[in-house]
Amino acid sequence: MAATSQDLARGGAGDASIRVRGVVKRFDDVCALDGVDLEAETGSVLGLLGPNGAGKTTAVRVMTTLLKPDAGEIRVAGIDALRQAAELRERIGLAGQYAAVDENLTGAENLTMVGRLYGMPRAGARARAAELLERFDLTEAGGRPARGYSGGMRRRLDLAAALVARPPVLFLDEPTTGLDPRSRLALWGTIERLVAEGTTVLLTTQYLDEADRLADRIAVIDHGAVIADGTSNELKDRVGGERLEIHLSDAAQAAAVGDALAPMAAEAPFSEDGVVKLAVKQRTGAIVEAVRRLDEAGVGVDDVGLKRPTLDDVFLTLTGHAAEHAGDEAAEDNR
Amino acid sequence: MRRLVSDTLVIAERNLVRLPRSPDLLLAFTVQPIMFVLLFVYVFGGAISTPGYAYVDFLIPGIIVQNIAFGGFVTALGLNEDLHKGLIDRFRSLPMARPAVLAGRTLADVVTNSLSICVLVVTGLIIGFDFSAGVGDVIGGFGVLLLFGYAFSWVFALLGLLVNSPESANSLGFIAVFPLTFISSAFVPVQSMPEALRWFAENLNPFTVVVDAMRALWLGAPAGNSVWGAVAWSLGILAVFAPLAVRRYRHAAGGR
């Protein structure tokens, strides 16, 4: 899409911690990445949003030197990911989709092992492990094998492992998939603190609220290509203006709403379960006018409000299909 | 090179630290081999004629070789698990020496193999096994066992990287290795086998060579070329399977 290259040109090119240009990756006859461009400024969060199988994980694997792309350029933290892969590995952290911890090792042993594999001496690695356990609220559990950890604890340990070498750039592949809401919120808080400390984060997610909350910029990816790119607000603007959301007393009157409000609608209304959503031509006075018209038409209303479009709306508009939550997680595992 | 050594040691340590925490693995290394020794000696032993040797003397070198060959299973299962649980991704995203993941695994096997050799030798000594050879030869026998076990660890490393699940690693490895160990001189004299099996056991099966080498080194049996043959087979297996496993590791971890 044309907007993609415009958005890229706008971002200060010299300042980018992640810069990906025209990356193509094929598996046999499947084109997993079909000319992907991405850019994240230092200290920002880039959200890679897309359904399962869109190519998010492949993109992360290519950027973290786990996969060689068939074409394209990748620079991360100023390092060429293709020619200087070994140097790059010193400067990135990766927390994967499945918490990659050794279940038979304790939390402390896991982190110490990672530290030593970064080349730290044993004592240094132990000290760093203790520091991270403390930070991620795992000190108490640190002496127990990770097998007994809850999902949230594993994710925290996995994230801690990614941070052992204090990498300036962090890749998080669906960090909260499968977590309960409380652990999810806690992990969001942790990620926000990391960003506040200056870490650049690339985060893939299939959760719109997650991208909305964490990401400074969002790249929407579908079928291996970036189909839109911008801030959350820019993307929402792209889908058009605000939506009038009307909760009906009687769901059967949905059709009557469409008729009554037709003069002020920018496009055809969408109704579901007694809630009618309607993009309006003009924001000012819309609520008052809607209430008046509905009252005249004899439609009973429980609640009326003006809502900004959600990323769900964005996704629906851009891809022609709704974002898929949960469900078929195996799709993208097929590596 | 220094990184390769230190990373290999870190990975080996990782694989050993977990051992005491997996009771099933510990059982596989200790109780299970003892059980087989006892079953063979006291159940089959009386029915198997081993001219020149008491059956326990005949059996111990054979059953140790069989055990050592299966020692690599830990590597197959462990690598397969690492691959599917994303640990290999983590390792590959670290600035570590790449071959260390495999080298550390197989090095850990040497330690567990030593453990199971000791368990079996001690069991054998208790029920009447006797070394009838010089100290040098006995030590040489341990060397041959560890080398052969190390070579087989690489076979299992490749297997673990090729298959889709630990279950298939288990059954494939079992199907491939179990008959090989039985159609050899490990449990019965090959002279008692039908012609075709005997020919296979004597001419094609590395297990016969290694078992014969062990009997030469520990019991003073006529060695022929078996000791050098055992070393050559081990080095040959290493030379073929180690590069294949490393290649497969690059490939598997690189995503198809």
Image: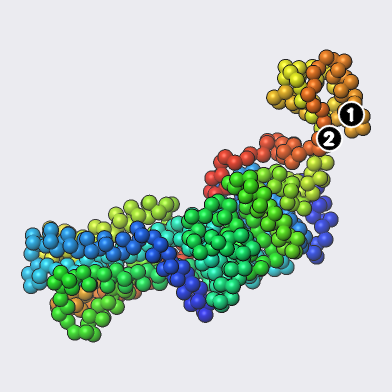
Q: Is residue B242 left or right of residue B4?
A: left
Q: Chain under label 1?
A: A
Farthest-out residue, front: A140
Quadrant housing residue B58: bottom left
Q: Which of the labelled discs sits on residue B232, or is there none?
A: none
Residue at image point 36% right, 60% down = B23
Q: Is residue B149 left or right of residue A284?
A: left
Q: How many marks?
A: 2
Where disc 2 sits, the SS reads loop
Along the line of sight, the residue nearer the viewer: A195 or A75: A195
Q: Is residue A60 left or right of residue A1?
A: left
Determine which residue is flagged by label 1. Answer: A286
Q: Which amino acid lies under the numbered mark 2 shown in the image of this protein?
A: Glu
Determine which residue is flagged by label 2. Answer: A242
Residue A149 place in picture, x, y as percent: 52, 55
Where disc 1 sits, the SS reads helix
Q: Which amino acid lies under the numbered mark 1 shown in the image of this protein?
A: Ala
Residue B56 place in picture, x, y as percent: 14, 68
Q: Chain under label 2?
A: A
Mark 1 and mark 2 in contact (Cβ < 8 Å)? Answer: yes
Along the line of sight, the residue nearer the viewer: A35 or B75: B75
Number of residues whose C-alpha sits closer than 10 Å to that of mark 1, classed few (under 14), some (14–19) or many (20 or more): some
Residue A27 place in picture, x, y as percent: 56, 51
Along the line of sight, the residue nearer the viewer: A183 or A243: A183
Residue at image point 37% right, 51% down = B168
Q: How is the image coloured?
A: rainbow
Residue at image point 39% right, 65% down = B19
B165 lies above or below A19: above
Alpha-carbon distance for marks 2 and 1?
10 Å
